[in-house]
Each structure stands twice: as structure tokens, then as C-alpha cells.
Image (cartoon, rainbow, N blue to C red):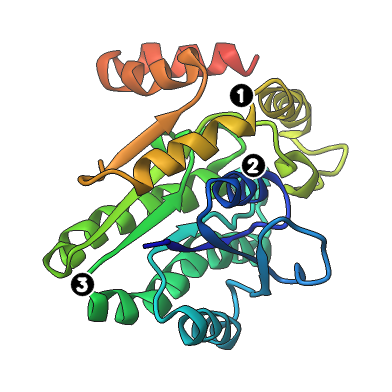
Amino acid sequence: MEKIILITGASTGLGETIANYLTKKNYVVYGTSRSIEHLPKSFNTLNMDVCDDKSIQDAVRQIIEKHGRIDVLINNAGLAIAGPVEALPLGEVQRVFDTNVMGTLRTIQAVLPSMRTHRSGLIINVSSIAAEAGLPFRGGYCASKAAVDRLTEALRFEVAQFGIQACYVQPGGTKTDINKNRLRVSLPDDSVYKETFDRTYEIIDESVSGGIEADVFGPLIEKIIESKQVERLYRVGKPLEKFSVVLKKLLPTALYERMILNHYKM
């Protein structure tokens, strides 16, 4: 039986790459974003805003009315922000959390009733390796992705009884449009953070432009979809990115923090 897949944030970047790959593999894919229906895509498209309850309910209803179910939800829509914690505009941080955390929660709540009825389903939440540490000038983003991870872990326990599985994928730096779309705090020239923030921001951008190719995620997502038992976490990135998570657990705090400060030239 063909699997029906809903992917959020599929207009560009990682979401589009995954949607294209799964479509070629003969899955029935619905890619969503706020204004995607006018764009030429290889997959089915639906306009859906993860920050709008009605928009989500309408999109989910359309898919279920046509196919009777949604087998896989891939929560990929996300928004990044960079800036010192002291200077983060609260409104923009709220936008990030509304997209990354509440948007994920809204779509989960929209698809779960149908999945429970069919006693099957899979929810894949796209997180980030950045969820594992509070990185300088990315506190808002790291916190939002850490929230997604903990939400997913709780979800796994709660829905297992209904035959539903859930996991999260932690990409490292990946070549996508995230640099272009990231919210960047504008600091005045006399800000005590400006020099270190500007220098660190260049390194953040380089980690994306020099990151792994987005193409590696299509086969990974297919592997997860076809797995009988889905793991809690799938971490994908360069060796140093993945090793940094291990080092945080093993190294004394002072040594680990010095390593991070040196990396960002702070």
C-alpha cells in the first residue's frame, strides 16, 4: 500500500529535497508552506501555515478526505535566529518558537486523531545538532530545537500504545537557504557584543555554506519510514559536529567551554 506523506516547510531547502526524493521513490507526498501551490514542484502541494491552526486543519482534512489517512508527518518547517541573549527581540524569539515548537505541536495534534484511528503512523521531527548545546549567539534557536527534542521524546511514550512511532532528526550544518532566511539581530556600533557577534556570525554562515549536502537526508528519511522499529534519534553531520556532542558529556565544563570559545574565536 502506498504511503501518504505530509512534509512541512517544503518550498525550498531540506524539505523540498526530501519531498523530491520521496516522490521519485513512489510515495504520495504533500509538501506544504505558506504559499507553495503556485510553485512548480514534482510533488503535491498545499498552502499551509504552521502558525495558523485553521490552515493546518484545512490541509490535513484535504489529504485525509482524498486518501483516508496520513501515514507519515515530517515536521521540517523552521526558523533560525542569531543574536546575543541580552539583545534578542522578544517578538522575534516568539516567532521562532511559534514556528519551530508550536508549529510542530500544532501539526502533530492535527494528524494524531487519524493515526490513532488507523493504529499506525510515523512522526519525524527535524531538529538540529544545535539542540544539544547552547551555542554562542544562537541561544534562541538552540532552545527551540531542544524543546522539539524533548517534546518528541514524550510523544514516543504516549503514542506507542496506538502503534504510532515518533523520532527526531538532528542535522548538522547543511547547505540550505537557512542563512538567507535566518533572523539576525541588528546591533548598534557601540554594542559591547558587536565585534564578537559579527565574527561569530561569519563562522555560523560558513558552517552552513560548507556543510553537508541536503541530498543525504532523502535516503535517511526513506530508511526511517521503512523501519519496523524507529530509533529515538538520527544525528547527521560532519564528524566534528557529532563528536562535539560526545565531548560535552565527557569533558570537564571549563575545558568544553574553552573549546567552544576557541572555535568561535571569542
Q: Which residue is tagged 2?
A: 84
Q: Residue at x 46, y 72 (%)?
A: 107
Q: Amino acid at mark 1?
A: Ile
- The N terminus, quarter of image: bottom left
Q: What percent of the width, then of the height, locates residue 124?
A: 40, 53
Residue 119 - label: 3
40 and 55: which is toward the camera = 40
> Which quadrant holds residue 48?
bottom right
The span from disc 2 to disc 3 (Cα, nearest Å) is 45 Å
In the image, residue 11 sits, relative to residue 199, either above or below, namely below
Quarter of the image where one finds residue 155: bottom left
Q: Is residue 232 visible?
A: yes
Outermost left residue: 161
With respect to residue 137, does 81 lie above or below? below
Identify residue type, mark 3.
Arg
Q: Position of residue 184 (x, y in %)?
A: 75, 46
Query: Disc 2 vs disc 3: which is toward the camera?
Result: 3
Question: Relative to 131, is 90 on the left or the right?
Answer: right
Write the residue at 70% across / 38% down: 176
Label annotation for residue 212:
1
